[in-house]
Image: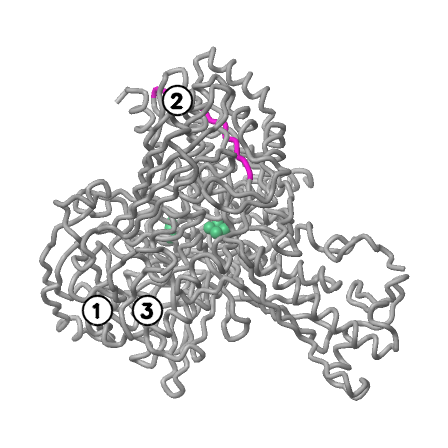
Amino acid sequence: MSEENCEITLTVNGEILTKIVKVRQHLVDFLRLELGLTGSHLGCEHGICGACSVRVDGSVVRGCLMLAVQADGTDVMTIEGLTETGEISDLQKHFVDRNALQCGFCTPGMLMTLAELLRKSKPSSRAEIREHISGNYCRCTGYHAIVDAVETTINDRLGDN
Amino acid sequence: MDKNPSLNLLDRPNSYIGRSLSREGAKRAVAGRGRYTDDISLPRMLHAAFVRSPYAHAKILAVNVDEARQQPEVALIMTGKELREMCTGPWIGTLTSFEGMKSAPQYPMAVERACWQGEPVVMIVASTRAVAEDAAELVVIDYEELPVTADKETALDAESSVIHPELGDNLAFRKTIDCGDVEKAVAEADVVIEETFEFGRHTAVSLETRALLADYEPTDGHLTIYTSSQVPHMIQAVFARTLGVAEHKVRIIAPDIGGSFGLKIHTYGDEVATTAASIKLGRPVKFIADRLESFLTDIHARENRVWGRIAVSKEGEIKSLEIDVLSAAGAYSQFPRTSVFEANQILNITGGPYKHKHYRAKAEVVYLNKVPTSQYRAVGHPIGNSVGEALVDRAAEACGIDALEIRRLNVMEDDQYPRISAAGINMQDMSHQQCLEQLAKNMNYNALRLEQDKFRKEGIQRGIGIAAFIKGTAPGPAGYYGTGGAPIASQDACTIKLEPSGGVICLVGVTDQGQGVDTVMGQIAASAMGIPIESVRVIEGDTDAVPYGGGTYASRATAIGGEATYQAALLLRSEILSIAGALLQAEANTLDIVNGNVVNKADETFRISLSEIGRIGHFQVAELPNHIQPTLSATYRFRLQDALYIFTNGIQGAYVEVDTDTGFIKLLNHWVVEDCGRVISPQLADEQVRGGCVQGIGGALYEECVYNETAQLQNGTLADYLTPMAGEMPDINVYHIETPTSLSELGAKGVGESGTGAAPAALMNAVNDALRPFNSYVTDQPMTPETILQALGKV
Ligand code: FES
Ligand code: FES
């Protein structure tokens, strides 16, 4: 390996991969450019907008603030993988039904972030939902419909249990 | 007998009009399967990066790219001068419809001079964006700094440097409107109030930045451009003409678009440069703006200073209104839509809801060494509404009249249309009175006032703000663009086809950026045809597929494109019925289409399915008499006739709490009642309003492109340019009054910008209502905590 490249082995959406990556490449560029996982988006590349949110070892991180080499040995889950697991299929359905997205560019990051909230399996007020997504920028919706969709999902889940 | 003789196609029980359906694009997006421009990769694709001027105004003395050119994997380096050689001529951002306006010639990249910080100077094309950026660092440019014009207030002073000497001064455009006799009205009025307002410079901040992938095929001269654009046909015309490619050989594809808001109805030099690189290299070249580039090159908007004066009788009747606008443009007028619309719209709409007869308005637009300005969501409306509505509130206060009451007294009456406003604009099909009463009800206005009093006694300062508004939507051909010489269609079209399977394909010139334009067009087509929505597929955003159209801007898609789709569907329906009539030996007018089948109009008995018509019409035409040659498709183009716009109206209410120690504003509640005519999809219309409001709130409270005295942008990151986040935003209560426009059969007006247009006005009035006990007024937006504390005399 040169100074510029490094070999990493990691799990992405359940699949084990070994790749040689540029040490300066951030995680989302790696996912998008090397793996074709274009569901993770880049809105600012300095950790503000949340469009790049992915799950690494169970926690949501800003994929633009993490280098691909730092993901060596980790378990990475993107919106594509999360969708396949069905973990948030109810939330995704409520997003569509309630039109909690317009352009959809923020949506994968928003959903990754919300998956974390849903895992807590406890009631959340609208203010708490708003607080939870306060690091995810959405220019289109004004957030109201997103809060509605999340509220419905939480209520449905609690009702079902 | 017709089963439902009184119902037209739009009102029938199986109509999709007025129903909220989910969007197909939304289903892809939530699964991470959206396809935005940057998600598209082509074989042998290269990436462009730009060296941009670090100065707001500088002469380019020398450009040395030798070292950069030596870098591995660099395919092309192009200077502004080299790009000029590939252009048919410069852009001049004027329209003849703006009499007397002037702008300097502009090339896609700076040639001898850079006129704003961020203007592209050199393009590097390489194997990856990172390699291109590495090489860009090795480009050496000698600049000679030139005097900078950064302040609109002094731009016209003799001492200020003239950015483009050939123009004589920094004036882009001047316009005045003078209706009635303002002087007399002021002299006779009981109360006259004047005030000056400042509005900061904003930019759109779509989450997906500008993006373009150009793919030129040198063997046959075809050029395909994938781009995050609202207006594919305009991009086709402008790029083809600028680079000397035949327009009909240029295909523009607008894939999924990550937010647009007017930002993406424009042409940008770096995108033309990227396209030129593809032509030169015969390879695909991609350019994706990064966030800093977005702040430095996306159009800016809103920087205006407005003086206003209102004259009222002591009973609160508005007698006259006057405004004087100083509007800050950038270094050039944006081609081809210009940089003067904002000022022009402020003149058109200020005081627009009211009956006063005397109106005088003046605007001057001046050039500055800053990013060019142009149309951004609700052009001019946030400013005009904020000024007009603040003055109305101040007048109410002076007369001792409640804020809602003074509007009740002065709004145009619902039964008095058509009429001409004081600004000289034809108004029709509006509902100010209904909207106002509905707002009072939705806000529970009287109870809210009591609650406000109660809190005030406890030392908590809450304020209620009301803002009535008009909004120009769906510009007509008598307006500005086409008439003014720009290749921008004000009409729009739909081609609709019956496929052999019975499925229907709708090709529309209007485009979707997530508003649900495609869903709405499908609802209209299915309703007009009498077929299930599942049978319809809508295609947009590809100039090779769709009929020529203007695309989506100025809240026109549903109003203009929707009517085109409706009429095209009616034409196809009638062809289907005549084919069915021939096959069934029945009179076409005794037949109907219901649920995708031709039925007897009288009793809805099944006669023949659309798939059978499709099969016969495409494969078994011998079954038809010789005189019938099925087309099974129809195209309809719709345009407004004489109207300048389809004006909509509405009213907003805001409820806020102001912390007078910190200057922080808490948004407690927000209400909108608006009239966009016939509502096709209530949920989609609501969400346009909500998203629009929050964008307006952003401008009113947080957003500003801050420049220093040498016109250096101080806050080009999302950490420094604040936008609304979920935690600070309120829920937004939306209600629609439906007064269909009489300018189309469908009756839909635009809805996409109404939220943005008046939310800042409602908010500023609410804040000032909260500050009333202190006799303090805020007149500047964004209303930062500092602005509030300044108004209170605390800093
Ligand atoms: S792209 Fe990572 S936070 Fe914006
Ligand atoms: S839906 Fe467009 S940014 Fe959120």
Q: Which mark is residue B80?
A: 1
Circle 2 residue: B659
Q: Position of residue B138 (x, y in %)?
A: 15, 66
Cα separation between marks 2 and 1: 52 Å
Kindly report the distance in space between the C-alpha atoms of the residues bearing marks 3 and 2: 49 Å
Q: Mark 1 vs ligand 1: CB under 8 Å?
A: no
Relative depth, front residue between B757 and B567? B567
- Neighbor class of circle 1 (other Cα within 10 Å; few <14, some 14-19, many 20+) is many
Mark 3, chain letter? B
Residue B272: image tag: 3
Instruction: Name the amino acid, label 2.
Output: Asp
- The residue drawn where x is 72% and y is 78% is B500
x, y percentage for residue B415? Answer: 64, 38
Residue type at numbered disc 1: Gly
Precedes in sequence: disc 2 or disc 1: 1
Q: Nearer the viewer, residue B3 or B507?
A: B3
Task: Give the structural element (helix, strand or loop) at label 3.
Answer: helix
| Residue A41 vertical placement versus B37 (above, below) | above
Q: Is residue B201 visible?
A: yes
Span shown in magenta: B650-661
Q: Are marks 3 and 1 on the same chain?
A: yes
User: Does A96 sit above or below residue B122?
Assistant: above
Q: Position of residue A69 (x, y in %)?
A: 33, 59
Q: Is residue B654 magenta?
A: yes
Q: At 56% from the left edge and 46% from the top edge, which residue is drawn? A: B687
